Image: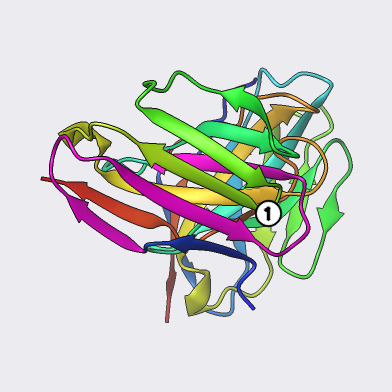
Amino acid sequence: DAKTTQPPSMDCAEGRAANLPCNHSTISGNEYVYWYRQIHSQGPQYIIHGLKNNETNEMASLIITEDRKSSTLILPHATLRDTAVYYCIVRVSNGNQFYFGTGTSLTVIP
Amino acid sequence: DTAVSQTPKYLVTQMGNDKSIKCEQNLGHDTMYWYKQDSKKFLKIMFSYNNKELIINETVPNRFSPKSPDKAHLNLHINSLELGDSAVYFCASSQGGAFDEQYFGPGTRLTVT
């Protein structure tokens, strides 16, 4: 499975959009991009995933570049409760590995 | 209702003991997982079961033995506990294939003294 690279930390002002980048330059054509987050001391929470097209759900939007070598998770209106570690993961469909990596620690500032 | 529950939430025990952590999901999912998160916050898959059958078994000491009595339960038994086993253990479940949208439990913090 492809590895991912994320900035270790980011800050975002409350109410503003949080844009979390992820590089996955070695991604293969059949690998999906997944995003999870882990709020302090809780279990990870699924956010969104995609293959090629941009995706949006009630939590966030996922923008995948045309070459698929990078993606951005967008939280449109960040709140204090969005402070968490955000993990970008790529995996092969029906693959048997799922690496969480080190993630990006997002702090939403009042 | 809690979707994925784990018991106990905290477990403190001495080296050499045997302990179990229980996990139950009420989502009707086919696949369940055990993850370990160490002190550096690295989260790593240990095992995965699909419909009570083991489908993923990472390089984990054989002191760790998962057991799935039915597809709603996946328990983790650990023999001869060592200091390095201290970590937070998360159970998760998903519908369909391995690693599809996973729902995680609250975690069990294991401390071995």
Quadrant position of the C terminus of chain A in the picture: bottom left
Kindly identify the amino acid type of the residue bearing the numbered disc 1.
Answer: Ala
Q: In the picture shown, does residue A25 fall above or below B101?
A: above
Residue beneath label 1, please? B72
- Is residue A100 in sight in this rendering? no
Q: Indicate the quadrant where residue A61 lies.
A: bottom right
Secondary structure under tag 1 reads loop
Asked if the stretch drawn in magenta spans residue B24, the answer is: yes
**Residue A70 or B40: which is nearer the viewer?**
B40
The residue positioned farthest toward the front in the image shown: B69
Locate residue A5, reporting x and y percent: 52, 32
Q: Residue at x 80, y 36 (%)?
A: B97
Q: Is residue B58 visible?
A: yes
Residue B40 placement (x, y as % from top left): 29, 40
Q: Which residue is located at x 87 percent, y 36 percent?
A: A52
B73 or A12: nearer the viewer: B73
Left or right: residue A28 versus residue A19 is right
What range of the chain is rendered magenta?
Answer: B9-36
Instruction: Judge whether A27 appears above or below B78 on screen.
Output: above
Judged left or right of residue B7, residue A72 is right
Q: Residue at x 74, y 62 (%)?
A: B27
Q: Is residue B53 magenta?
A: no
Note whether B11 is above or below B71 in the view shown: below
Task: Please say if B24 is above or below A91.
Answer: below
